[in-house]
Image: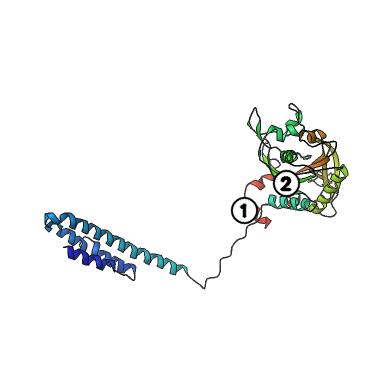
């Protein structure tokens, strides 16, 4: 019996097969109910009692080896079969579809590009902020109605932790951690508690800018913004500054550009005025500089902030703001 088992073991070890059918034949020959290994198991009754233990173990090992061998043969053959099926060297190459940048990234990158040419670098900060960085340091007194200008999503009350409503919070962080001259752009996502519609969303994107040095004047601000408008919208673009109010700038202004759609003649897009508003700006309020540890007697600065969606609307004439966050491929493919 022992001899038979070891002979069969050797044979099984050296089995080969060319096709899956061959494997099946081998399986039947050795492992089926009427196969050679089963026959040995049938004979087991005749093994003398004192050998049963040893022979039983040998038989089990033999059967396991045979099972493994058959499985191996089968796996090798089916893997090879798949490989050769797949290899058709005459097939033409599959074309890879190239993706496109998101329109908001395109516009943000272009804004950064334009300002980096006049020395601005990029700063970033957290979207979850405390009250001081978003409001307190920026001259929003505690009960001031200006806080209502930007309906805020609060995460915790007392102390207030909130989603930033503007990236001016990053400017706070830069002013408290760097010494002038400071010339930074702060791009990023901001959140406001607004009902979602074609013209408003509860989050959007801004790029804000800050320049602080000795003798920075409103004329510098105007010059930088005119340069930006011409680079972004074309050489023939005109700008107009209207007095406005922001707690953190004094004086403050809103900037319009001549309407790109009608060329300034008046159309529904510009509400027949010939102008469209694109950003807010002003000279950094001395309270803000002092609160952030910058001596307002020595330094002055300007700041501006714009919505990326708004600029993208003007450039690409997207009528519904929601398209920017829906990830509809039919929309996004148009920006290749
Ligand atoms: N932080 C303002 C806003 O979110 C924009 C702004 C920035 C205005 C800098 C003036 C100066 O609306």
**Relative to 198, does residue 146 appear above or below in the rendering?**
above
Q: Earlier in the sequence, mark 2 or mark 1?
A: 2
* The disc label shown at residue 57, or none: none
**Relative to 286, does residue 222 appear above or below in the rendering?**
below
Relative image position of residue 194 (x, y in whole percent): 68, 36
Q: Is the residue indicated by label 2 positioned so its CB lies within 8 Å of ligand 1?
A: no
Residue behind mark 1: 329
Q: Quadrant of residue 80?
A: bottom left
Relative image position of residue 158 (x, y in whole percent): 65, 27
Q: In front: 334, or 187?
A: 187
- Secondary structure beneath disc 1? helix
Q: Mark 2–mark 1 contact, CB under 8 Å?
A: no
Relative image position of residue 65 (x, y in whole percent): 28, 61
Residue behind mark 2: 308
Q: Residue at x 69, y 51 (%)?
A: 105
Q: Quadrant of residue 148?
A: top right
The single residue placed furthest to the bottom in the displayed view is 90
User: Quick one: label 2, few (<14), some, or many (20+) residues within 10 Å?
Assistant: many
Nearer the observer: mark 2 or 1; the answer is: 2
Kindly tell me whether residue 247 is visible in this rendering. Answer: no
Q: In front: 282, or 87?
A: 282
Q: Quadrant of the N terminus?
A: bottom left
**Relative to 292, does residue 108 appear above or below in the rendering?**
below
Indicate which quadrant contains ligand 1: top right
**Separation of disc 2 and disc 1 at Cα?**
20 Å
């Amino acid at each position: 019996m022992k001899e038979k088992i070891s002979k069969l073991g050797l044979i099984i070890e050296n089995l080969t097969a060319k096709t899956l059918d061959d494997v099946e034949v081998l399986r039947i020959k050795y492992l089926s109910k009427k196969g050679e290994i089963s026959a040995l198991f049938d004979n087991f009754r005749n093994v003398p009692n004192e050998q049963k233990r040893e022979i039983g173990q040998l038989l089990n090992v033999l059967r396991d080896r045979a099972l493994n061998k058959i499985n191996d043969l089968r796996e090798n053959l089916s893997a090879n079969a798949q490989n050769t099926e797949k290899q058709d060297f005459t097939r033409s190459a599959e074309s890879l579809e190239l993706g496109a940048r998101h329109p908001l990234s395109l516009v943000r990158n272009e804004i950064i590009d334009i300002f980096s040419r006049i020395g601005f670098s990029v700063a970033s900060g957290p979207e979850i902020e405390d009250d001081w960085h978003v409001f307190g340091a920026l001259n929003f007194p505690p009960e001031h109605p200006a806080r209502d200008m930007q309906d805020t999503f609060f995460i915790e009350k007392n102390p207030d932790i909130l989603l930033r409503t503007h990236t001016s919070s990053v400017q706070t962080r830069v002013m408290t951690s760097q010494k002038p001259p400071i010339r930074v752009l702060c791009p990023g996502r901001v959140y406001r508690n607004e009902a979602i519609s074609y013209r408003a969303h509860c989050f959007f994107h801004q790029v804000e800018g800050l320049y602080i040095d000795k003798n920075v004047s409103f004329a510098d601000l105007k010059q930088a913004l005119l340069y930006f408008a011409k680079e972004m919208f074309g050489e023939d673009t005109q700008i107009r500054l209207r007095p406005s109010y922001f707690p953190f700038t004094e004086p403050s202004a809103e900037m319009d550009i001549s309407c790109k759609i009608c060329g300034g003649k008046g159309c529904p897009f510009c509400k027949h005025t010939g102008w469209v508003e694109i950003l807010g700006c002003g000279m950094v309020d001395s309270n803000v500089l002092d609160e952030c540890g910058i001596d307002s007697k020595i330094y002055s600065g300007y700041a501006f902030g714009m919505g990326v969606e708004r600029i993208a609307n003007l450039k690409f004439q997207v009528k519904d703001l929601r398209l920017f966050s829906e990830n509809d491929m039919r929309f996004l493919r148009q920006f290749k």
